[in-house]
Image (cartoon, rainbow, N blue to C red):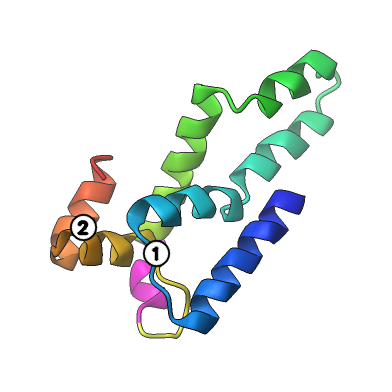
Amino acid sequence: MKEIVRNYFVEAKWFIEGYMPTVSEYLSNALATSTYYLLTTTSYLGMKCANKEDFEWLAKNPKFLEANVTLCRVIDDIATYEVEKGRGQIATGIECYMRDYGVSTEVAMDKFQHGRM
């Protein structure tokens, strides 16, 4: 939860300063603010079979968890891009990708949909 709040602060700072991060900056911050790490961890709390070792494993950010969180973040960006566009929200990964690589919305969406960012 603390990491989410810290990363929300980063997004707020970017928004206030009008800063558009690079794709890599955006993703490293947005993975936490997607809340999927938190949801995964808290879902373990409801499992009677979860133990200390399970939480220690999650704390090491296994590749499986990171891949899941990345996939969820990218799907969320694709789904919300059109809704958020022009509403004064923090830049999405789609917008960052378009700016970084000088591509159209369609190309950026295709890259995100096929996991080739």
Q: Pick whichever, 31 or 44, lies toward us.
A: 31
* Amino acid type of the residue that numbered disc 2 sits on in the rendered structure: Ala
Q: Which residue is mark 1?
A: 21
Residue at 38% x, 71% y: name it.
Answer: 20
Q: Which residue is mark 2?
A: 108
Query: Is residue 57 in the magenta section?
Result: no
Residue 108 point in image, percent of width and height:
21, 57
* Amino acid type of the residue that numbered disc 1 sits on in the rendered structure: Pro
Residue 117 point in image, percent of width and height:
26, 45
Q: Secondary structure at mark 2?
A: helix
Residue at 13% x, 66% y: name it.
Answer: 104
Magenta segment: 79-85
Q: Which mark is residue 107?
A: none
Which comes sooner in the sequence, label 1 or label 2? 1
Q: Nearer the viewer, mark 1 or mark 2?
A: 1
Q: Secondary structure at mark 1?
A: loop
Dot 2: few (<14), some (14–19), or many (≥20) neighbours within 10 Å? many
